[in-house]
Amino acid sequence: MTQRRGGAGGERMIGTTDESRGLIVGDVSVECMVLDPAPCGAEFSLEELAGDDPLMLHNVHCAYRIADTDIPVLIQGPTGCGKEAFARAIHRVSRRAARPFVAVNCAAIPETLIESELFGYRSGAFTGARREGLRGRIAQSSGGTLFLDEIGDMPQALQSRLLRVLEEHQILPLGSDSACAVDLHVFAASHRNLREMIRCGAFREDLYYRLNGLTLELPALGVRTDKEQVIRAALPAAWRLEAGRIEPDALASLLAYPWPGNIRELRNVIRTAIAICDGGVVRQCDLPAQIVAARGAPSAAAPARRPGLLGSAERAALLRVIDVNRGNMSRAAVALGVSRNTLYRKMKRHGIERQTWRAGEAAESARLSAAPAG
């Protein structure tokens, strides 16, 4: 059975299952999953990134609605969950697709250089400056998309300058006395709780509200409802020069592992396993010890491990989605793709008190009551 996915370049084969060999993986009778090579560095569409997870499908629905606007987008989620890949996928379906997608990791650039990297400088602006000056990343992204990764790590002095750029759509390079107009669509991303940073005085509140025109929450791989689909899709994406196979036990270990490093960890594990395996077949011995151990642990220990890791991840995801929707449970339930009753049950299970969020519900009820009939 061959699975295909649509993308910008048409259909792409992502995996072939040989159903004639009779071993069982989950509910599917197979011996090995035969993997066809995918292009190196292949980019994924929004639909491919969403899979069948309800929260991701909601994110894709919202992404299409804002793709051709200049509404800023704040993408939040744990490290390694694919925030930049999601931003690039939105860029590719937008009217700006032919223009640059410029990514800046605010945590990776030294504080002494980030200002000149972002805003650029004129010749002679400071000692050691290039003779020809430098066109900053913001100017490079004009007409396209600017992606500010790890925005929570941007120095506070730069936060005020960025806020001014977003408000005025102009930049002033270092050493220049004339501003340049820029056409921006800004995406920002962070794995940190920016609201908590605001409360601690580490992030500007006015910049936060300027950046979060739309907030998209990407779930951890361990709590996605389509975890198996994501893992299967990652296998051929990592296969390089020739088709190979993965034994059912190895695939079962990948499915049992909670993936604290999310999709980044998954891809690295698959890439390494393919590189070190013998005879083009990935076996359990080709996987890291912690992945094999996660499946092979005694069943009595499994319940204690799962709530500790996956439970805390689900609780964090619930809190963040409720917070983004300002305590409105109806909107939070829609964002999560569940009913309100299911949301309340999950809140109770994780010890999340409704009392904390009732102000948001009351405000929404008052708004609806005040709305004119008909």
Image (cartoon, rainbow, N blue to C red):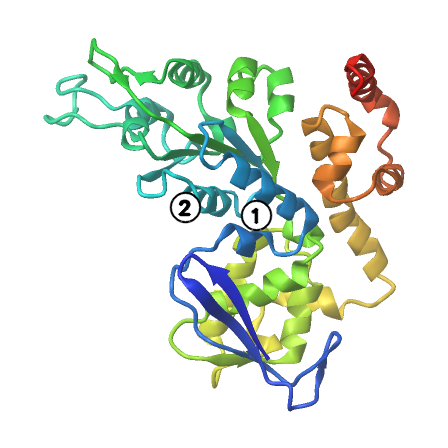
SS for dot 1: loop
Q: Quadrant of residue 216?
A: top right
> Is residue 213 at all visible to an observer of this figure?
yes
Give the residue pinned by disc 1: 81
Residue 241 in the image, given as x and y percentages of width and height: 38, 75
Q: CA distance from mark 2 to mark 1?
A: 19 Å
Residue that sits furthest to the top in the current view: 177
Give the mark nearest the N terminus, 2 or 1.
1
Q: Quadrant of residue 171?
A: top left
Residue 217 horizontal side relative to residue 223, left or right: left
Residue 360 in the image, given as x and y percentages of width and height: 78, 20
User: Could you tell me which residue is drawn at 57 percent across and 29 percent down?
Assistant: 214
Residue 262 in the image, given as x and y percentages of width and height: 59, 52
Give the residue pinned by disc 2: 92
Residue that sits furthest to the front in the current view: 374
Above or below — where is 40 with respect to 77? Answer: below
Above or below — where is 315 with respect to 185? Answer: below
Residue 209 horizontal side relative to residue 119, left or right: right
**How many other residues sit within 10 Å of disc 1, few (<14), some (14-19) or many (≥20)?**
many
Above or below — where is 366 with respect to 288? Answer: above
